[in-house]
Image (cartoon, rainbow, N blue to C red):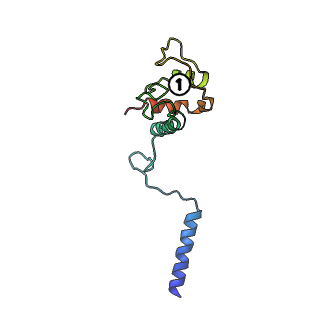
Amino acid sequence: MFDRRFLMFKMIVATVGLFSGCRCSPSTPATGVTAGAEDPKSALIKRGKTVYAGNCIACHNPDPKLAGSVGPDVYGSSLELLRARLLKGGYPEGYQPKRPGAGMPLFPHLEPEIEALHAFLNAAP
């Protein structure tokens, strides 16, 4: 009988813990940052990498430092260039394109992700 009550107690404690929404995780005492938490800049770069992989590598190289089959290398692109190319299909004033032609389509759906894409394309290796 004792074993059944003890087992029942353990099940109740586990269920309460499961449904209580407890997000217990260790904190780093010096910083108060939750262990395993990503800093905002790293998170932005990571999101930009996902945006790049999902939208850009069809024409640009998977490595943005290398030219792709259709598009040029894009590593180090400025925020101004990204906005001009992705949203308007043009170039910033005075910018000299790396390749001739205007084959790049517009990507207006990426407007909220341009800063993340910029962070990825300008991240130190």
Q: Nearer the viewer, residue 103 or 74?
A: 103
Depicted 99 relative to depicted 19: above or below: above
* Left or right of 9 on screen, residue 61: left
Q: Quadrant of the C terminus?
A: top left
At x 54% / y 69%, what residue is drawn? 14
Depicted 40 relative to depicted 33: above or below: above
Circle 1: residue type: Leu
Residue 75 placement (x, y as % from top left) = 43, 27
Count neighbours of disc 1 (C-alpha within 10 A) and say few if under 14, some if 14 to 19, many if 20 or more: many
Residue assigned mark 1: 82
At x 46% / y 26%, what residue is drawn? 74
* Left or right of 97 on screen, residue 110: right
Q: What is the number of callouts on the image?
A: 1
Residue 40 placement (x, y as % from top left) = 48, 39
Residue with the most extreme right position: 108
* Left or right of 77 on screen, residue 87: right
Q: Secondary structure at mark 1?
A: helix
Residue 46 placement (x, y as % from top left) = 47, 39
Q: Nearer the viewer, residue 117 or 5?
A: 117
Depicted 99 relative to depicted 31: above or below: above
Q: Nearer the viewer, residue 48 or 65?
A: 65
At x 53% / y 36%, what residue is drawn? 51
Residue 29 placement (x, y as % from top left) = 39, 50
Depicted 55 relative to depicted 3: above or below: above
Question: In terms of image quadrants, where is residue 64?
Answer: top left
Residue with the most extreme front position: 69
Residue with the most extreme top position: 94
